[in-house]
Image (cartoon, grey):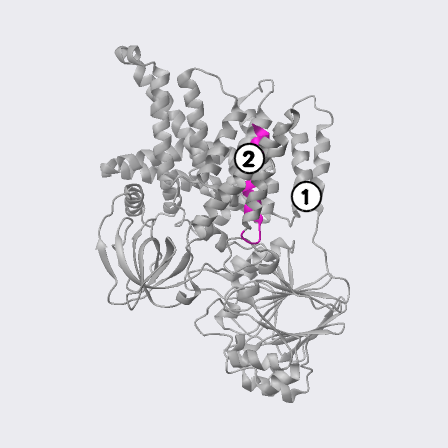
């Protein structure tokens, strides 16, 4: 059964690793290959294995096809359209914008021509959005849409993959037109999501202003959008973020409490026991309670796993038959991937099942340990250490304090906070009781919080860049380390963990530099790394929604590369698309020197004005600021942006930020060298920059345009692109390439485009 499960899982995973949609011949080959093995009795297991692999591959393909088709035609991108649909998920509002998901029933052009749209849309409604928009309503809306497209960087969150997992075929916004109107206040089939919405609203009213409101809401209905960023930082640093998800632990706890409570109550009725044995009655009620709690969580992956495992355990209790725990877990895995094959793309899938595997392996088949605290402490150690390789793979950091934090937080939250929260939700029909219980739960959680904050500060997270191959020896080493007593040389398992923690990415040779243009949308952030030093040039934008590319792109990229400090940070000017992410970078990673003319930046880095003549040499690579002059250090204007020239061997890189024609003339008259192999084009390719004389003076081999996908400015302008093409430059746009990487000083100019080197079937080309 285990080998068959692995085959099915590998088939599903293989489909999602393909760069493009598979040819029909692939399916024919997969389904034809097993049959010859059936002729040989000894090889029938190979045929079964291959059939299950083909089944997994085909199952994932059918599911993926349904998610990707129909897609949004490019002709309808950024074009006003009419759509009729039903709100089918919890909407979120931060006071400035309302975000919601719409299940499409009908799509039309403004002229009334019917068009085919993706089944689900993710929309934003700015200014004047209705406060009465709730799940289950049918709306007629005028919208502008675009295909799923996101920033694409190493270490960053893959928003396109997330949209694919959620079945969202297009994103966009609602236009404030006169024909936006509510068509039906309630549509059948959305009772559960409406219930979750009502509970969320009631919780918001009861706990309004309470610092733990977001976490209590997460524990009640699995909705985590209201948890504050700083709270997330503490939870991640202490490895307790699983506590604010409705996890298998919480579902199992609810089922267990209800089982024993109902069994006790049932036994108080002798006639009831004659009709149905108390354990059987309790099994049914416990499963229903677990089902209700999982439904409140929106049937997340951990709750799906827990539900299947509980159903098997309680079913075995009903039929009074034993069932191996490993088989229960395998059945749960089958159920999850058959219901939702795309769940394998989620880190939660792997972390959820891996946690249970480590508990079963590390606690099973042993002489009974003495002491409850030892057994409980061992579980926390198993989970924290066992999941560390996966946490490093998915998030480039792991919590060292997790065993200590969870030793206290898990029983505290599970035995006190969760029961009070659920009792409060159930009692909301009686406001006085429900409010008291919920406020008490929030108060208990707030009492625990100083302990978690202290741990997050006292024991920092472990930031490590890892290579995928190091997971295999690490996994074997952990199996060896947690093997039962009597296994030879168990501490030797630690040796197999060394590749995981000691591996480091390759560094440029002396005299060369690695240049990376990050994909931050309509903004700029670039990284120049030499053998022993690192420079960041600009940090990308921060948007009114709160999305910050310093935090979401720059910091994850540095973690993925194993970089723990910045030698020099240059913030070219005060434009928010260049400096917006700087506060996040300055507060999250040590910066030795800050070169900028922008005054209001946080941090304790040594500050210097960014002006012509500032130069230094790192590992045989020359850096020089060639603009602005000391007499013109205003941070407010594009023409006063810091311009940096980097020289490595025969290669030169020119970073120009947002300079325009006036600054280009100053540079042409300055006597500074402007020729460059690679040019990050001024001002994203606007009409006010890249004058013909400047382009001729630089004569770049590569002209890089840092632009956002279908940005509202229309950058880069076609006439600007043509100027660079006329001098023989190869044009690269960051929205098409994702992160771009060049090696300077090697004599080789083969850029590596992250979007092209890491393609997936869900990416719309």
Query: In the image shown, does 244 or 166 lie closer to the viewer?
Result: 166
Q: CA distance from mark 1 to mark 2?
A: 28 Å
Q: Position of residue 468 (x, y in %)?
A: 65, 46
**Which quadrant of the view contains residue 399?**
top right
Q: Is residue 260 left or right of residue 537?
A: left
Q: Is residue 577 left or right of residue 203?
A: right
Query: In the image shown, does 620 or 297 lie closer to the viewer?
Result: 297
Q: How many numbered marks, from 0 up?
A: 2
Element type at mark 1: helix
Q: Position of residue 73 (x, y in %)?
A: 42, 62
Q: Position of residue 704 (x, y in %)?
A: 59, 72
Q: Is residue 403 visible?
A: no
Which range is magenta?
1-21
Question: Which one is in front in this view, the residue at disc 1 or the one at disc 2?
Answer: 2
Question: In the rendering, which numbered label is found on residue 52?
Answer: 2
Decide which of tag 1 and tag 2 comes sooner along the chain.
Answer: 2
Q: Is residue 674 visible?
A: yes
């Amino acid at each position: 059964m285990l080998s068959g499960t692995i085959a099915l899982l590998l088939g599903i995973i293989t489909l999602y690793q393909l760069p493009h949609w598979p040819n029909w011949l692939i399916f024919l080959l997969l389904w034809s290959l097993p049959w010859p093995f059936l002729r040989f009795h000894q090889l029938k297991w190979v045929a079964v294995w291959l059939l299950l692999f083909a089944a997994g591959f085909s199952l994932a393909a059918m599911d993926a096809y349904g998610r990707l088709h129909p897609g949004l035609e490019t002709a309808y991108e950024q074009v006003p359209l009419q759509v009729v649909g039903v709100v089918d998920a919890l909407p979120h509002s931060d006071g400035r914008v309302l975000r919601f998901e719409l299940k499409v029933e009908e799509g039309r052009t403004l002229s009334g021509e019917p068009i085919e749209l993706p089944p689900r849309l993710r929309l934003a409604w700015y200014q004047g959005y209705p406060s009465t928009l709730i799940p289950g309503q049918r709306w007629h809306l005028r919208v502008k849409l675009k295909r799923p497209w996101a920033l694409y960087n190493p270490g960053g969150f893959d928003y396109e993959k997330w949209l694919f997992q959620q079945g969202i075929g297009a994103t966009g916004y609602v236009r404030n037109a006169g024909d936006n109107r509510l068509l039906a206040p309630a549509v059948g089939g959305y009772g559960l999501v409406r219930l979750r919405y009502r509970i969320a609203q009631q919780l918001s009213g009861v706990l309004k202003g309470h610092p733990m409101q977001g976490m209590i809401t997460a524990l009640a209905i699995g909705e985590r959008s209201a948890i504050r960023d700083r709270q997330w930082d503490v939870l991640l640093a202490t490895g307790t973020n699983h506590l604010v998800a409705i996890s298998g632990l919480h579902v199992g706890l609810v089922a267990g409490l209800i089982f024993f409570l109902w069994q006790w109550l049932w036994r108080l009725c002798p006639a009831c026991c004659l009709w149905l044995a108390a354990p059987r009655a309790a099994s049914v009620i416990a499963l229903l309670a677990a089902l209700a709690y999982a439904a409140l969580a929106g049937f997340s992956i951990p709750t799906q796993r827990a539900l299947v495992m509980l159903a098997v355990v309680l079913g075995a209790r009903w039929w009074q038959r034993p069932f191996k725990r490993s088989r229960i877990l395998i059945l749960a895995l089958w159920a999850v991937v058959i219901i939702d094959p795309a769940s394998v793309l989620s880190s939660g899938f792997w972390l959820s099942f891996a946690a249970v595997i480590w508990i079963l392996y590390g606690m099973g088949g042993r002489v009974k340990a003495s002491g409850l605290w030892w057994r409980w402490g061992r579980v926390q150690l198993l989970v924290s250490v066992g999941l560390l390789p996966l946490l490093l793979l998915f998030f480039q950091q792991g919590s060292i304090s997790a065993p200590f934090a969870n030793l206290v937080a898990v029983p505290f939250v599970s035995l006190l906070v969760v029961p009070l929260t659920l009792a409060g939700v159930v009692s909301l029909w009686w406001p006085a009781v429900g409010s008291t219980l919920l406020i008490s739960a929030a108060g208990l959680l707030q009492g625990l919080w100083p302990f978690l904050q202290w741990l997050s500060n006292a024991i920092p997270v472990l930031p490590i860049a890892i290579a995928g191959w190091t997971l295999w020896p690490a996994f074997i080493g952990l199996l060896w380390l947690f093997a039962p007593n009597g296994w030879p040389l168990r501490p030797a398992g630690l040796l197999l963990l060394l590749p995981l923690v000691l591996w480091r990415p390759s560094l440029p040779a002396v005299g060369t530099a690695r240049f990376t243009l990050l994909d931050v949308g309509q903004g700029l952030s670039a990284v120049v790394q030499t053998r022993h030093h690192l420079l960041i040039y600009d940090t990308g934008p921060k948007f009114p929604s709160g999305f910050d590319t310093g935090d979401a792109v720059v910091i994850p990229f540095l973690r993925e590369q194993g970089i723990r400090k910045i030698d020099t940070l240059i913030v070219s000017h005060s434009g928010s698309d260049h400096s917006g992410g700087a506060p996040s970078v300055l507060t999250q990673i040590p910066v030795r020197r800050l070169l900028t003319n922008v005054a209001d930046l946080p941090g304790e880095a040594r500050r210097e004005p960014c002006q012509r003549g500032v130069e230094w040499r790192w590992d045989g690579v020359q850096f020089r600021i060639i603009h602005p002059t000391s007499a013109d250090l205003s941070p407010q204007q594009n023409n006063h942006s810091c311009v940096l020239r980097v020289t490595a061997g025969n290669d030169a890189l020119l970073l120009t930020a947002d300079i325009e024609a006036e600054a280009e003339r100053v540079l042409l008259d300055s006597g500074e060298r402007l020729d460059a192999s690679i040019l990050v084009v001024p001002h994203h390719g606007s009409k006010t920059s890249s004058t013909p004389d400047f382009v001729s003076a630089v004569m770049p081999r590569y002209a890089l345009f840092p632009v956002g996908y279908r940005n509202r400015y229309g950058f880069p302008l076609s006439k600007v692109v043509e100027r660079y093409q006329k001098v023989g430059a190869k044009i690269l746009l960051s929205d098409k390439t994702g992160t771009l990487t060049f090696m300077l000083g090697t004599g080789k100019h083969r850029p590596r485009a992250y979007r092209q080197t890491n393609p997936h079937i869900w990416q719309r080309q």
